[in-house]
Amino acid sequence: MSLDKEKIKHVAKLARISVDEAKVESLTKDLNSIFKFIEQLNELNTDKVEPLTSILNQSLRSRKDEISDGKIREKILKNSPKENEEFFVVPKVVE
Amino acid sequence: MADITNQSLNEIIENVKTKKVSSTELIKAYVKNIESAKKLNAFVTTTFDQALDKAKQFDNKPNFDQLLPGIPLAVKDLFCTENTKTTAGSNILNNFIPSYESTVTKNLWNHGSFLLGKLNCDEFAMGSSNETSHYGNVINPVGDQLVPGGSSGGSSSALAADLTPATIGTDTGGSIRQPASFTGTVGLKPTYGLCSRWGIVAFASSLDQAGPMTKTIKDCAIMLEAMSGFDEKDSTSINKKKEQYSKNLKDNIKGLKIGIPKEYRVDNMPKEVDELWEKGKKILKDLGAQLIDISLPHTKYALPTYYIVAPAEASSNLARYDGVRYGYRSKQGKDLIEMYEKTRSEGFGDEVKRRILIGTYVLSSGYYDAYYLKAQKVRQLIKKDFDDSFKKIDAILTPSTPSSAFKIGEKTNDPVSMYLNDIFTVPVNLAGLPALSMPAGVDKQGHPLGLQLIGKALDEQKILNIGYAFEKNCGFKNKIKKWWS
């Protein structure tokens, strides 16, 4: 299987990363060499193998649905690139 | 007294306890070293003033019963540190100041140590040479043209150059063990779940594990003891009794069965690596261990599996960097979507973008079964290889890396050749096992090489014991000349 430039632009769109037109060529080359490497797995027959979903022999713990902190709005907003009093600010979404 | 910074952590602790050196004197010695080692570019941030305050507090009211009394430590910049900038080596976190402390670093501070600074690393821990950091390449103290390994390259460089008495890194596919091997130091990747992942900038959550990087095995045991432990904030943390790794360290390995896997060889592997492996086998055998040939038949599929699983998890984990709640935001972008796209394009470096794109693709509709599901099945086979072998052996001995440290720029144009560097370290992460890299010798250029000991899940004490016995009989001495100061 090989990835063409259009496919890569589509995946970049899905990943919300804008890709410089000038860089698409080298990115295509790199990703194709990586996929060629990855596709060695096709040599293996895995029809009867269960996928590994957890390496721990334990299921994830659940905890009580209780508030363990709170009143930390200021701390949470402190690192935002743009905020207004109590909110994160983003470019206008609704006209 | 003589230069205290070239001693082991254990020796330094003894010197503090017997009041031969104060915490304040200690930190002054490290500050001096760090300031004269700017060429290595090991630090992204230093916290000298804060550290000096803590040292003075300790000296005024010392508590010598702690594991790390008055010890300054620099840590990889992937651990969130409260009120100290945490970048993960990325431009997208160039202004991020966490309001919380990672569990692992908090554990270290609770044992009496304090933060000396944050160490450079590959961006989001994605790299094997510390050449993907937004904050520049880190140099290996072994030679001014050499990479320090990656992703914990700032950690290995700082440790080998006496800029911190010990340090911690994270290991997703070899990021502790490979840099340790490249710098002649000790690095341990613990069993998945032994050290909390809470507050560590996430890369691939089913593989990531924090661990110690030190000058000696004893130091490694001390650090592991201090940093590990159950944490309810990490849902994959293992709830078990805390071990006293340093107190229980023993050098008697008589009768232990050591597996030698025939698959741990690659084409064009320098003959020194093979010779070193032979030397390692001989040392263990002479100490009374029994060598047993084993086979881990799916070893060659570990890297291709890793390059599906790790990018898939990374693409999900890194979706959070959107320029809204924290981190860098692009000035461009007329609407919300364009703002996301520009922010992520300008904020992430090339290697991180590559991996996000691979991950997005392998998880995308129509391709999930062919890639991600396939990889999870092969991961099962790789784990089974280890499970089967460990029924008849106690530990596995392999080389840590297929070569010694390579030159800066040597592999940057070919991602796959860079990935191949982790061929001996990646299988362990896929199987969730503990593994130790210990310095064992040098190649013909005099560059350090390491051997790896792999243990059963939660069998850290045993591989530390084997490492301890090996270290006493190997006679490796790191001969680094301080060319940078």
Image (spheres, coloured by chain):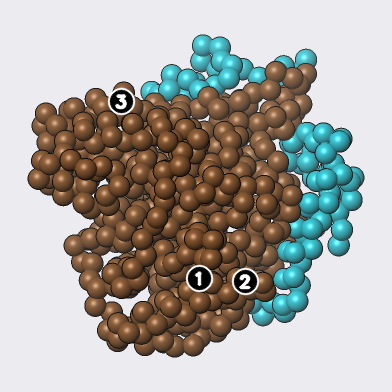
Q: Nearer the viewer, mark 1 or mark 3?
A: 1
Q: Residue at x 56, y 30 (%)?
A: B93
Residue type indicated by callout 2: Met
> Which quadrant: the C terminus of chain A?
top right
Q: Which SS class for mark 1? A: strand
Q: Is residue B474 above or below residue B160?
A: below
Residue in view at x 74 percent, y 36 percent: A17
Residue B103 in view (yes/no): no
The hue of chain B in the figure is brown
Observer-side mark, 2 or 1, equals: 2
Q: Is residue B47 above or below residue B350?
A: above
Residue at mark 2: B269
Where does label 1 land, which residue? B399
Report, in whole angstroms, how far the alpha carbon at label 2 lies from the one at label 1.
Answer: 11 Å
From this view, report whether residue B331 is shown above or below residue B97. Answer: above
The picture quadrant where one finds residue B63 is top left
Chain letter, disc 2 residue: B
Circle 1 packing at 10 Å, graded few (<14), some (14-19), many (20+), is many
Tag 3 and tag 2 share a subunit: yes
- Quadrant of the drawing holding the N terminus of chain A: bottom right
Dot 2 and dot 1 within a common chain? yes
Please say whether residue B334 is visible from this viewpoint.
Answer: yes
Q: Which residue is mark 3?
A: B50
Do residues under tags 2 and 1 come within 8 Å of each other at their CB atoms? yes
> Mark 3 or mark 2, which has the lower sequence index?
3
